[in-house]
Amino acid sequence: MGSMGRVGSALDNAMAESFFASLQTELLDRKIWPTRSSLKAAIFEYIEIFYNRRRRHSRLEYLSPLEFERRQTSFKSQQFDKLLAVHQSG
């Protein structure tokens, strides 16, 4: 299925197309699925366990979402601690 609209329009679905391309090549094309329920379970595991937690994403500096989130939280916590120290000393 092609894109639904022009680039930059509200109907542009490039992110969804990218996700489904990854799903297709990283999961669906690698095995023949004997039942619909086994496919459903595999897709759930792919999204919730692999894609959202472990898979490295170019948009996140090639970190997994979990690692990116940890680093962002740590960085924000360090920034907050610095601001608090400055505020308390001033």
Image (cartoon, rainbow, N blue to C red):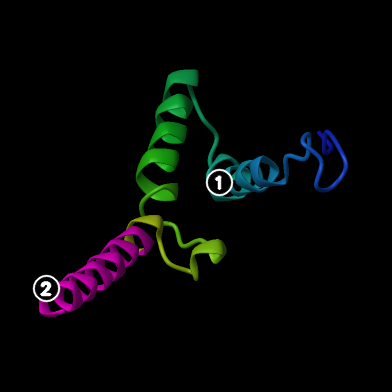
Which label belongs to residue 30? 1
Residue 21 locus on image (x, y percent)? 66, 46
Amino acid type assigned to the residue bearing label 2 in the image: Gln
| Label tally | 2
Left/right placement of residue 63 relative to residue 86 reads right
Q: Quadrant of residue 78?
A: bottom left
State the residue at coordinates (72%, 46%). 14
Q: Nearer the viewer, residue 27 or 3?
A: 3
Q: Nearer the viewer, residue 82 or 12?
A: 82
* Magenta-colored span: 68-90
| Residue identifier under label 2 | 88
The residue lying furthest to the left in this view is 88
Gap in angstroms between the C-alphas marked 1 and 2: 58 Å
Most frequent secondary structure within the magenta stretch:
helix
Q: Quadrant of residue 47?
A: top left
State the residue at coordinates (66%, 46%). 15
State the residue at coordinates (60%, 49%). 22
Amino acid type assigned to the residue bearing label 1 in the image: Arg
> How many residues crowd around disc 1 within 10 Å: few (fewer than 14), some, or many (20 or more)?
few
> How many residues crowd around disc 2 within 10 Å: few (fewer than 14), some, or many (20 or more)?
few
Left/right placement of residue 4 relative to residue 73 reads right
Above or below 43: residue 35 = above
Q: Quadrant of the N terminus?
A: top right
Above or below 66: residue 16 = above
Q: Is residue 18 magenta?
A: no
